Image (cartoon, rainbow, N blue to C red):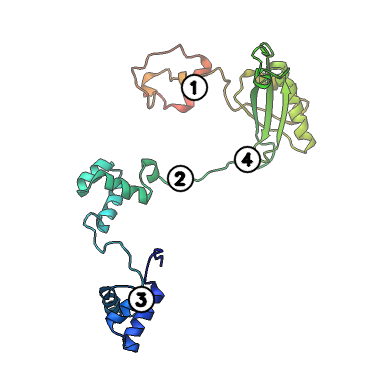
Amino acid sequence: MNSHKHARLTYARRVELVEELTKGGVGTTQAALDYGVTPQTVRKWLGRFLAGGQASLADASSRPAHSPRTIDESKALLIVELRRRRMTQARIAASVGVSESTVSRVLKRAGLSKLKDLEPAEPVMRYEHEAPGDLLHIDTKKLGRIVRPSHRVTGNRKDTVDGAGWEMLFVAIDDHARVAFTAIHPDEKREQAVTFLRNAVAYYARLGVKVKRLLTDNGSAPIHAVSRNLCPARHHTQIHSTLPTANQWQGRALHPVRLARVGLRLDIPELSTPRQGSRQLAAPLQLPSAS
């Protein structure tokens, strides 16, 4: 109970009041003078006590017992059911006969305000190969070379680092153990890719891991490094690239036969003549020609 600071009768004082009236034989007028309230207030609490006992002397909720504007429980359940059938809030309001704000309020309480809330969240599926070395992920990250503090540090706009160039961070991660090997090289050209692959395979060999397959999408340099047989562990490993080179745009890898373009408009113009590599990339992704 949270009585205001000017309350003359708290719960304990009300109990004392009714006890004096019922047991002490004190009259209503005298009790009103003793407790500093009006006789009407004394009779009110006495009547509540006689009707509901001591529990009725506590403060009652100020919430009305009935509110004409409160939505019915059955309508609230109907709103949720219609929402699960992917009806819009405007259609639900028209069907149930309530305002859109009421529908919005009910759906917010139910956690169904957005359509994406109707779909259960897909569990995170973490895949991995059975043994270390079955698949090695190769990726690169272009980083700006740091030669001296620039204007962001010194505050002088003349302190520029134009022409400092870039460095390439090579990263190799084992698919099963998630053990990584990284190295920074001046670029990602063929020679640097060869050096990184040689060092990566040697690093995993020291851990007792034999690399069997390579996964990369960073152009032809890592693939060329494998094909030239430049890795020292080549004699006991077979390293292959499972992705096409990066210069094969998947966005333009259209099936040469228009009728076999699943999910694409047949009137889409050719952006360029598909190269042989693009045709090989598109073939597994499209249905075969009707002919």
Q: Amino acid at mark 3?
A: Tyr
Q: Residues within 10 Å of mark 1 (few under 14, many from 20)?
A: few
Provide the residue designation for mark 4. Answer: 129
- Say what secondary structure mark 3 lies in: helix
**Foreground mark, 4 or 2?**
2
In the rendered structure, the answer to whether residue 169 lies left or right of residue 110 reads right
Provide the residue designation for mark 1. Answer: 250
- Say what secondary structure mark 4 lies in: loop
Marks 2 and 3, the one that precedes in the sequence: 3
Looking at the image, do the residues carrying marks 4 and 2 touch, with CB atoms under 8 Å apart? no
**Foreground mark, 4 or 1?**
1
- Say what secondary structure mark 2 lies in: loop
Provide the residue designation for mark 2. Answer: 121
**Foreground mark, 4 or 3?**
3
Q: Amino acid at mark 2?
A: Ala
Cα separation between marks 2 and 1: 28 Å
Marks 4 and 3, the one that precedes in the sequence: 3
User: Residue 41 is drawn in which quadrant?
Assistant: bottom left
Q: Is residue 197 above or below residue 133?
A: above
In this rendering, does residue 229 appear at all? Answer: no
- Say what secondary structure mark 1 lies in: helix
